[in-house]
Amino acid sequence: MKNLRLFINVNARFYGDHVDYLSNELRFLHWPGCPLQTLPSTFNPRKLVELYMPCSRLSQLGEGFKRLQNLTSMNFRSCELLTKTPNISGIPNLQSLNLDYCRSLVEVHPSVGFHDKLVDLSLMCCHNLTLFPIIKSKSLEVLNLQFCRRLETFPDIGGKMDSLRYMFLHGSGIKELPASIVYLINLELLHLSSCENLTNLPPSIYELEHLNRICLRRSRKLVTFPNKVKSEDYVSTLSELDLTLCDFLVSIPKCITKFVNMRYLYLHGCKRLRDIPELPPKIVKLDASDCVSLERFSSLSNILKGKEDSQMIKLVDLCNCHRLCGNLACDLRKKQNILAKEQITIFFDHLLSSQKHGFQVVFPASFEALSTLFSCHKYVKERDEACEFLIEIPPNFKCQNQGLALYAAGENPQNKRPRYNGFVTKISVNQPGVEPYFTASDFRKNGSGHGIGSGHVWLCYIRFSEMFYRDDQITWPRSPFACRVNFLNLTLDSLCLKSFGVHLVMTQDDEDLSIFTEDGESESDDLEDANERFDGDNCIDLCEDEQDSEHDYFSCEDNEDGYFY
């Protein structure tokens, strides 16, 4: 079959598993599971474009693969007998080389590192790979060496590489990165999670001006970061830093403030981390859950001190950060002329005052710590019990600078690993054209898999300007109006949500407006029919009478657990 151009063989087997001839006119050779250990000696496919032979028994390609001008793609995925890659210098137009799961592969030919047209190079799970050549490729965009566990030395970068954007090294045995990584001038993603031998990063990593994301999750021997940034012009694009479960990480350098576009910082399970310094201004999410040694958090301390222009991060998870919360409580108690029972009020006021945006925060606290401060709150006895509130907004109320504060309190008395523990909040307004607003939260923990052990509180502040924002504009409701708040409990495991609450956040100018009387009923005659305006549904007001508590809120006396009391 001398003129054969296309050969695709799926699950068909030749008698004796022996083939001594293949057409040199082939353009496409697709033969998954090929039983041959080597291709026929007469096979010289000068016109071959694509070679697809995953899960085959090939151990070498033969002499015919030295000059293949048209070949653009080779796939040898899961070829378990392949011990080294071929010399690809005679394949000048090769763009993709896949060697994933070639578990016997020991070394990569130097020609691979200097290939001018190669775009995608993947050697995932090559567990015996120990040697990798110097890299200086003009066109390489993706380099995948994940789970190459015996590869301890990352190759030097031979010169400036404009094209490399994604580098996947997670699960590899790499101990350190070379300073020459600075030549990867357009690198966007550096994935180093589960690199159990990695201890530090070179200072030159800060000079990667297009780096968008660094993931170091479960790199358990990582101790710290370089402390100096040479120029303010660099690192401006970094938006995400993931340090989840970096057990030996003790501190974060203060130069993190120079990452001016950072939005996401993940520190979950960094059990030795003691201090979170001042963070960049654009941070929107911080996960510091299970940082059991954490003692200081500059951004939150500045808010509690009333520092001008201090803003709460939109999403903060401080689950199981008992030591930090205990220290914050002590700092509040040390304020002059402030009694212990007044500290919860001060904390609440500082957290909500002058906020330009909404936020959510989860932290250790007793159930009573916030409930008595909320104009509406309810204790939940059954897991599937519905919880619904009606907040009536009076005439002349200024929505522009106010919002709603929500809380939920829960505990996990059995301390079991959760599947999902959370709830959804729906806020409806009894006026036409105003769509419901939804927000969701959970007490779920990933990584270590452990959820909250004892009492925790979820606190959420939603500004009316965010609630009524739709289609690039704000549709303000006409006052008086009413907000119905529904909490939908989605807990599947041992976590028990004990209470929920809603509070109308007002400025001093609005504080004289009556919202609720002592029995939870509105004094405004204009709002007596508020329930009827919700399309006839049975909107109910479940506001509880405020009860005096015997607790000294935020007291640090006998506060060994690090709770807000």
Image (cartoon, helix red, strand yellow):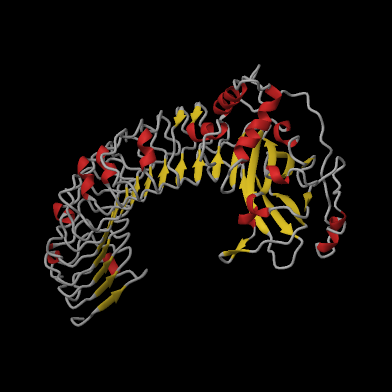
Indicate whether 551 appears above or below 425: above
Front position in the image: 532 or 381: 532
Q: What residue appears at the point 69 percent right and 42 percent down from the top-left corner? A: 508
Q: Nearer the viewer, residue 127 or 415?
A: 415
Q: Quadrant of residue 96?
A: bottom left
- In the rendered view, tell whether residue 470 sits above or below residue 292: below
Q: Residue furthest top?
A: 558
Tally of numbered tags: 0
Q: Position of residue 344 (x, y in %)?
A: 67, 30
Residue 429 image point, x, y percent: 74, 59
Residue 194 seen in this snapshot: no
Tell me if 129 is positioned left or right of 387 in this view.
left
Image quadrant occupied by the C terminus: top right
Q: Is residue 240 left or right of residue 531?
A: left
Quarter of the figure that contains the N terminus: bottom left
Can residue 195 be spotted in the picture?
A: yes
- Residue that extends furthest to the bottom in the rendered view of this protein: 3
| Above/below status of 155 relative to 454 | below
In this view, the residue in front, 526 or 44, is 526
